[in-house]
């Protein structure tokens, strides 16, 4: 019996939140926290407060040293560090000390302008370093020249100090405001260092020394008049002397972080303005797996090409999000097969009487970016299933409601997508809602879709808060799905998240193994990615791949309606699983080939007949398109790399074969293996292709459009195999292939290419 109790104001809770408890004490507190949402909320708040304190203290500079520094000496300022005490009993005192220290640093005294007679002008500083120069102890007379010595950097080059901007005398109101802001601040008297001499210039006896912390206001100082460039005397040995005739004689500067410190450094009425630093990029932790474009392979040595199908479309809508936002998408965010498969094509579907749920459409024409090459399009079409003929569905929405999902393009968009799907469900379908943040919960038990108001009400009540414990949610969602399993029906978990798992099982490999194990239960997975800034594309793609599922990215309410409205049957009903494609090339006609895309779906040739190896799935009515670029026999081609001659094998004939060397006119044969949704043994289909020599101009409309989309991916990826493809040529091919445009998606693609033309030249 465990009678251990702890309250929100217990010091041990603070120690636990800061990671200071050990052994049994830590175990007991952790169990109490896990069982009490109020304690969990208190722990989250303590950790958040500690994080803010740490960030604030690290941002504050240490006080200036009391001893003087030489003129050219760099003083490295290290941020204050917080050392945790190992005893939980003093954790509360540590937090109180942090608050006092933060308050003290923010109220650090500053130098009033009139008290800064003997300070120096701060030179430009590198991160973590400060420099100071000597300044005259006595003010110069109006109109007299003043020399400021700027030390060289470590490489011997003069530093970049930007421009010298003449300042306008302050108005009476400005002077009064300045004095009022500085009045409560205690003046700091800077000790006078020993005379320091820089080569090429001599500081006046008793010259003062000071430093000026950087401030954003200095970088944003706007010149009262047109700035004039500092004229430097490069002949001064060891340093650069900048001389100006000054209208005013008083030298002033400010030190600190108050209103006075917001003013730029002033030397005899002249503002010294540093060049503005480059704007920091927005915080971004989006993650994409590295993709290396498939290279050409010699058909004689590699006659088989094997891959698992992919009906995911996430890459296209994610690329669209980047381009519509004025950004070039990351190269690894562009997966060519997902761009091509986003669009529907006029492939013939299997007839109701056909025994197989997959039909193939093959076409070949010249490759427009390499006219001497041939381009082969392989199209697979899944059997259509009407809404009335679709089996009953057991759906479990697994929804990330952590704090990172609060943005309008995250949880609100997911809720819109769910409403769209609920409207499409049949009365005998069932829906459950599982949510996860710090802990997981059943927001709605499995409920018949006929209780639509109840389901929609549960969706509306969802709120984003807490951290992301995805593994715990996955466990619960699959348990709920299994508890309500429909034999012969559709059993699916629909995961909606930004993929940022940061609590519980966070390692991607462990998450993938978890999903892989759950997929054996007969429950399929749909992954819906949302958001930006912390979007984890790589994680969601792998989870969908290993969960017998599909992966889509929702960048808008329109996309949500497309995925879970227009294509609801394909999104829910799987007609074939573990679908693999193996292409056998005829070396008498094919010298080399390369597969466009599918880099993360490639399989070993032995995997094709191995039913233990998983592959992609095809939903009802889904189409899969794959493109091969082929170098025909007789066309000049040199492989990028070769292997040494084999010692124990008969050397192969290195001379190119002629097209008459074999009687077979077939260019290649496409072999497809698939399993039924509830089957374990695959079935083989074969489709040969003969090249009739058609030009690209004579190709079908669908062929031209698919080629344009693939070319778009080649350009965005800056692929080494893009040939002559440009955005302008992509636009031309797409216009020829627009044809009938149901839904307007092909027309939208044309607009996207034009948007890319505006962005790519500007961003390189």
Image (cartoon, helix red, strand yellow):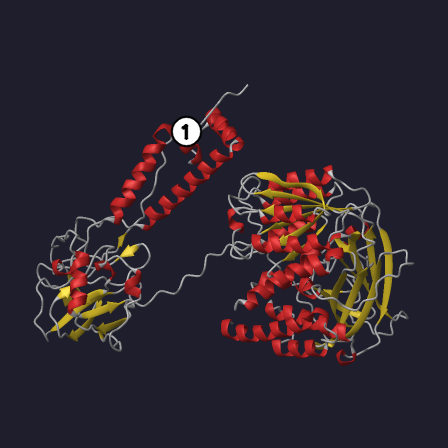
Residue 42 sits in quarter: top left
Q: Is residue 130 above or below residue 467?
A: below
Left or right position of 13 against 137 = right
Q: Is residue 480 above or below residue 529?
A: above
| Residue nearer the viewer, 504 or 125 | 504
Q: Is residue 35 above or below residue 561?
A: above
Estimate the x, y position of residue 252 in percent, counting from the top left: 16, 63
Left or right position of 268 against 432 = left
Which residue is pictured at 85% across the width and 56% down the height? Answer: 357
| Residue nearer the viewer, 32 or 583 | 32
| Residue nearer the viewer, 668 or 44 | 44
Secondary structure type for disc 1: helix
Left or right position of 81 against 472 = left
Q: Is residue 647 at least partly visible in the picture?
A: no
Estimate the x, y position of residue 677 in percent, counting from the top left: 80, 48
Which residue is pictured at 70% across the width and 69% down the height? Answer: 743
Residue 375 sits in quarter: bottom right
Q: Is residue 476 at least partly visible in the picture?
A: yes
Estimate the x, y position of residue 704 in percent, counting from the top left: 73, 75
Estimate the x, y position of residue 596 in percent, counting from the top left: 70, 65
Q: Which residue is mark 1?
A: 12
Task: Tell me the quadrant of the picture where the N terminus can be found.
Answer: top right
């Amino acid at each position: 019996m465990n009678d251990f109790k702890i309250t929100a104001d217990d010091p041990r809770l603070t120690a636990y939140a800061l990671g200071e408890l050990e052994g049994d004490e830590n175990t007991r507190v952790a169990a109490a926290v896990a069982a009490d949402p109020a304690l969990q909320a208190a722990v989250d708040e303590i950790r958040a407060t500690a994080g803010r304190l740490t960030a604030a203290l690290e941002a504050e500079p240490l006080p200036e040293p009391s001893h003087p520094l030489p003129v050219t000496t760099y003083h490295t300022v290290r941020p204050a560090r917080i050392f945790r005490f190992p005893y939980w009993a003093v954790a509360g005192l540590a937090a109180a000390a942090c608050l006092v220290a933060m308050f003290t640093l923010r109220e650090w005294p500053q130098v009033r302008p009139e008290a800064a007679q003997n300070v120096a002008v701060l030179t430009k500083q590198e991160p973590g370093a400060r420099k100071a120069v000597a300044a005259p102890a006595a003010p110069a007379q109006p109109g007299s020249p003043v020399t400021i010595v700027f030390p060289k950097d470590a490489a011997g080059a003069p530093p970049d100090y930007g421009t010298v901007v003449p300042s306008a005398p302050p108005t009476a109101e400005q002077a009064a405001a300045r004095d009022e802001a500085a009045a409560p601040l205690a003046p700091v008297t800077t000790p006078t260092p020993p005379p320091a001499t820089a080569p090429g210039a001599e500081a006046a006896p008793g010259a003062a020394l000071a430093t000026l912390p950087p401030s954003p206001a200095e970088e944003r100082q706007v010149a009262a008049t047109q700035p004039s460039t500092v004229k430097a005397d490069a002949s001064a040995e060891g340093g650069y002397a900048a001389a100006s005739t000054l209208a005013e004689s008083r030298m002033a500067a400010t030190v600190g972080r108050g209103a006075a410190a917001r003013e730029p450094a002033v030397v005899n009425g002249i503002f010294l303005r540093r060049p503005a630093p480059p704007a920091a990029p927005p915080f971004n932790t989006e993650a994409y797996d590295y993709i290396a474009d498939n290279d050409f392979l010699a058909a004689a040595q590699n006659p088989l090409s094997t891959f698992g199908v992919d009906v995911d479309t996430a890459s296209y809508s994610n690329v669209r999000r980047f381009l519509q936002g004025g950004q070039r998408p990351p190269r690894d965010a562009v997966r060519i097969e997902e761009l091509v498969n986003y669009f529907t094509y006029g492939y013939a579907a299997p007839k109701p009487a056909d025994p197989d749920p997959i039909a193939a459409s093959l076409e070949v024409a010249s490759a427009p970016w390499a006219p001497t090459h041939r381009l082969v399009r392989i199209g697979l079409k899944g059997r259509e299933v009407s809404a009335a003929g679709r089996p009953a569905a057991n759906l479990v929405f697994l929804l990330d409601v952590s704090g990172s999902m609060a943005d309008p393009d995250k949880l609100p968009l997911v809720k819109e997508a769910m409403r769209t799907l609920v409207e499409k469900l049949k009365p005998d379908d069932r829906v459950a809602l599982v949510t996860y943040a710090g802990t997981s919960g059943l927001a709605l038990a499995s409920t018949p879709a006929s209780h639509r108001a109840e389901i929609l009400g549960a969706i509306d009540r969802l709120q984003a808060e807490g951290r992301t414990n995805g593994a715990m949610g996955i466990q619960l969602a699959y348990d709920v799905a299994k508890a309500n399993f429909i034999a012969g029906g559709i059993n699916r978990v629909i995961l909606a998240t930004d993929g940022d798992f940061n609590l519980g099982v966070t390692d991607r490999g462990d998450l993938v193994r978890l999903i892989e194990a759950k997929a054996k239960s007969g429950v399929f997975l749909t992954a819906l990615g949302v958001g930006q800034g912390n979007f984890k594309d790589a994680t969601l793609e792998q989870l969908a791949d290993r969960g017998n599922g599909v992966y889509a990215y929702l960048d808008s309410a329109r996309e949500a309606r497309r995925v879970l409205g227009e294509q609801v049957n394909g999104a829910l009903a799987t007609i074939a699983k573990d679908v693999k494609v193996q292409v056998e090339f005829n070396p008498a006609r094919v010298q080399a080939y390369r597969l466009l895309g599918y880099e993360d779906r490639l399989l070993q040739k032995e995997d094709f007949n191995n039913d233990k190896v998983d592959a992609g799935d095809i939903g009802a009515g889904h189409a899969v398109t794959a493109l091969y670029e082929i170098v025909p026999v007789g066309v000049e081609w040199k492989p990028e790399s070769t292997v040494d001659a084999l010692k124990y094998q008969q050397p192969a004939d290195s001379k190119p074969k002629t097209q008459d060397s074999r009687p077979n006119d077939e260019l290649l044969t496409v072999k497809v293996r698939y399993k039924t949704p509830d089957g374990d043994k695959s079935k083989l289909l074969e489709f040969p292709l003969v090249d009739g020599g058609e030009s690209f101009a004579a190709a079908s409309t669908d062929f031209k459009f698919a080629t344009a989309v693939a070319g778009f991916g080649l350009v965005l990826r800056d692929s080494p195999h893009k040939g002559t493809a440009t955005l302008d040529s992509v636009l031309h091919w797409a216009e020829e292939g627009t044809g009938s445009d149901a839904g307007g998606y092909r027309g939208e693609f044309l607009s996207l290419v034009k948007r890319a033309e505006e962005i790519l030249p500007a961003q390189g």
